[in-house]
Structures are given as C-alpha cells and as structure tokens.
Amino acid sequence: MRKPVIAGNWKMYKHPAEAAGFLHDLAPLVDASSQVDIVVCPPFVDVAAAVDAARGTNIAIGAQDLFWLKEGAYTGEVSAPMLVAAGCGWVIIGHSERRQYFGETDDSVFKKTVAALDAGLTPIVCVGERLEEREAGMTENVLATQFAGGLSGLTPEQFAHVVIAYEPVWAIGTGRTATPEMAGQAHHFLREQIAVRFGDDASQTTRILYGGSVKPDNIKGLMAQEDLDGALVGGASLDPVSFAAIVNF
Ligand code: PEP
C-alpha cells in the first residue's frame, strides 16, 4: 500500500505571518486525515513561522528548492542541512518553473536529490513535458530523459526515499488539467522506467504524485487512477479550505 501525499507548493506567495495564519486555519480541517501525508512548502523566509505553527499537527513543512552543497560562498543559496535544521522534512526539486526560469537541469536535479537524501529530507522530484513536446508525441521520451538524468544514478537505497511528481508543464497554473487517463498513462510509463532501473518492488512502492491545476473538484477522478498516489498542488494550496478539501478527497 502506498500512502498518498498531498503537497502544497506556495511558489512565491505569502509572508511569514500569512503562513502562520494559514496553518492555524488548515490544521483543524485536516486533523482526521491520518491516511495522507500532508506537506506544505512555503517560500524559504516563511519556513520558521510555518514550522512553528505546524508543531503538534499532522502537517509537515517542506521547501521549494535547495542547493546541493552543504555550505560555502554561494550567495542566495540554502542547503539541505540548513532546511533540516529549520524543521523541514521535505523538499521539491526540479519544478518546471525552476527548469524554465532558473536553469535547472537534469544534472542539477540529480545533485540536489542526492543532497536532500543525504540530509534526510524526502525529495519530491518533478518531471513533465511541455505542450509542444506532448503535441509532438514526445511525452514518454521527455519523461525517460528526465528520469535517466535526474534519478537513475541514485542507488536503490537512495531511490527508496524518493517521491516523484508528474507535472505536465502545460497544466501548471493554466486551469487545464490532464485527464485522469492521461495522468494514469504517464504514471504507468514512469513505473515502467522505475522497474527497469530499480526493479519491480521499487516500481510498486514508489509514490508518484500528479501536479497541474489540481482542485477540489478534480482530485477524486485523478485519485481513482491506480498508479497515482496524490498531488502536488499550486494555486489551490493557497487557500486552507480548498487545500483541505483536496487533502480530504
Ligand atoms: C505546481 O506549482 O506544482 C502546480 C501544479 O501548480 P497549479 O496547481 O497551480 O497548476
């Protein structure tokens, strides 16, 4: 049995006081959801306030990125051990916005994933095709390339702690969701890639989330897909009531 994960990616929204207020509002709405891992990933500057506000609840706090070295002269960067010290348990890696605007590559995704695992963080590693790639029939090639470059170099022991998020770029923030069948096909293809590299057990136990305009009204249909183990939620994670409705699908 794979335990579902519902993770919120706040992107560059909310100040520390707003983060604390959100968590105080969210906690009672999801306190009966013991069958789901609930993760909120605020901006770095909100982490301390979010960790404080989430203490004693079933909500874990994650970050949206990290740098792969532990410390050094890297202005503006934050390391995995720093995130752990601040109270994070999770981290998003390789989000398409980081790939698109900040030069994230499969190679940097790999280094960041190793750094996260070394520090004891659970990485949510994002993969997904752009619209023109889907239209050109390249979806599986893109997923295979991102899997090979970002994840296949891990050891099986490392890979056992990875969560994957399939996020078709054309569905992120657009209101255009992949149909449950499209998502199911991509998740199935990713499980095949995992089986080839890490074996059947890993293929069956790895949690694969879907991301891309997930809302309270489409989560049920998505979760009915057998290869889909939860969601990485952007826009709808900014409101405690809609995020709770997704958690309580
Ligand atoms: C995301 O940011 O990972 C995302 C899926 O965003 P949205 O839910 O807004 O499409």
Image (tube, rainbow, N blue to C red):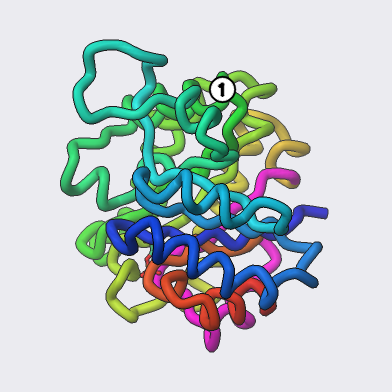
Residue 177 as seen in the image, left or right of residue 85? left
Identify which residue, 142 or 230, lies in the foreground: 230
Q: Residue at x 64, y 59 (%)?
A: 38
Q: Residue at x 71, y 58 (%)?
A: 57
- Quarter location, residue 157: top right
Residue 197: percent from left, percent from top: 60, 29
Identify which residue, 121 or 114, lies in the foreground: 121
Where is ligand 1, by quadrant? bottom left
Residue 164 as seen in the image, left or right of residue 203? left
Secondary structure of residue under mark 1: helix
The answer to whether residue 178 of the structure is visible from this angle is: no
Crowd class of label 1 (few under 14; some 14 to 19; many from 20; radius 10 Å): some
- Report the magenta residues as a range: 205-227
Residue placed under numbered mark 1 in the picture: 119
Query: Is residue 206 located in the magenta-colored stretch of the structure?
Result: yes
Which kind of residue does numbered mark 1 sit on? Ala
Residue 61, compared with residue 146, is above or below; it is below
Residue 65 as seen in the image, left or right of residue 202? left
- Quarter location, residue 56: bottom right
Residue 171, compared with residue 83, is above or below; it is below
Residue 5: percent from left, percent from top: 64, 58
- Quarter location, residue 30: bottom right
Query: Is residue 90 located in the magenta-colored stretch of the structure?
Result: no
The answer to whether residue 212 of the structure is visible from this angle is: yes
